[in-house]
Amino acid sequence: MLDQYEQADVKSFYDEYGYFIFKNIVPLKLIEQSLVEIDLALKSQWEIYFLGTKYPGKDIAIIKLFSRNRHYRRVVYEWVNKRMLAPYNYAMLDEVKQICKWVGFESPMFQMAANRFHLPEENDFKTGTHQDIGIMTTDISLTLWLPLVESTRMNGSVKLWSKSHNEDVIVPEGPDYRGHSWIAQSITDKYQEIWEDYEPGDLLIFNTKTIHTSTPNNSDNCRWATIFRFDNAEDNKFFDMEENPLHKGYVMVEDKKENSGFKVTETDKAE
């Protein structure tokens, strides 16, 4: 599926702008497996807490399940975000291995794979502008973002800032509602915003120093996606250090109730 692209063109664009968008290169059957796996996980919980009520599908189910209480929400969020097996399939694709080599990763080292989902009307809790470099091991590292459903400006596509990977590692501001931090607008204003629409099967890759964020979900349904990353095993300049200097690019505060990223109910306030 990479036949429509030339390695030199991809590498040149990626090096200059800090990202590249591949169109229709991930098999749709794998994406369907991801969606089915999410549905099965949510359906198992639906049948426990909404016994006798027909399962309404993942978009409605996750909203109603998340509304039970903040403690339960954290468990289900962890499951759907990090405990699904399907996201790992993408990291093993031959196309992904080839892409890694095209952009200079002769020895890619898998870092993580997880689902990312963005519920309607929860825009205060989306992750703000950030780099991924702060959680990586190597200075040369790569993020790959895959939409599982159509991802547009309406339902919360990814926005990134072209050429912002030239900023190196940025010490972020913070914290926001989720306990995460963000990058100051004075930095992002220096770069052009790239905000595209994506179809399932498309694949966005970007340098982990490229500034990016998810945009507001103003639709009626959840925006489902998968993200996975690679370090470069040949980039070993920080391996012997007690503290990796890249980690200054990630700040996380204690997950307290008022800025945990989960809506606080009246019951919670009374605790």
Image (spheres, rainbow, N blue to C red):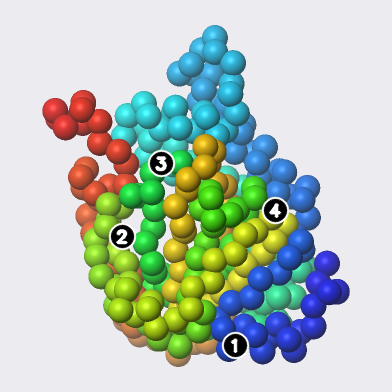
- Numbered mark located on residue 200 in the image: 4
Q: Is disc 4 in contact with disc 2, using a CB cutoff of under 8 Å? A: no
Image point (61%, 33%), residue name: 39
SS state under label 4: loop
Mark 1 or 4 closer to N-term?
1
Q: Mark 1 points at which residue?
A: 15
Q: Residue 121 carries which label?
A: 3
Nearest the viewer among 161 and 77 is: 161
Q: Which residue is drawn at 54% across and 38% down?
A: 221
- Residue type marked 2: His
Give the distance between the C-alpha atoms of the residues marked 4 and 2, in whole angstroms.
28 Å
**Quick one: label 3, few (<14), some, or many (20+) residues within 10 Å?**
some
Q: Which of marks 3 and 1 is nearer the N terminus?
A: 1
Q: Which of marks 3 and 2 is nearer the N terminus?
A: 3
| Place of residue 38 in the rendered image (x, y in percent of width and height, measured from the top left) | 59, 38
Q: Do the residues labelled 1 and 2 touch (CB within 8 Å)?
A: no
For badge 1, the amino acid type reads: Asp
- Secondary structure under tag 1 reads helix
Amino acid type, mark 4: Pro
Where, by quadrant of the figure, is residue 127 drawn? bottom left
- Name the mark nearer the viewer: 4 or 2: 4
Provide the residue designation for mark 2.
Answer: 180
Asked where in the image residue 266 lies, by quadrant, the reply is top left
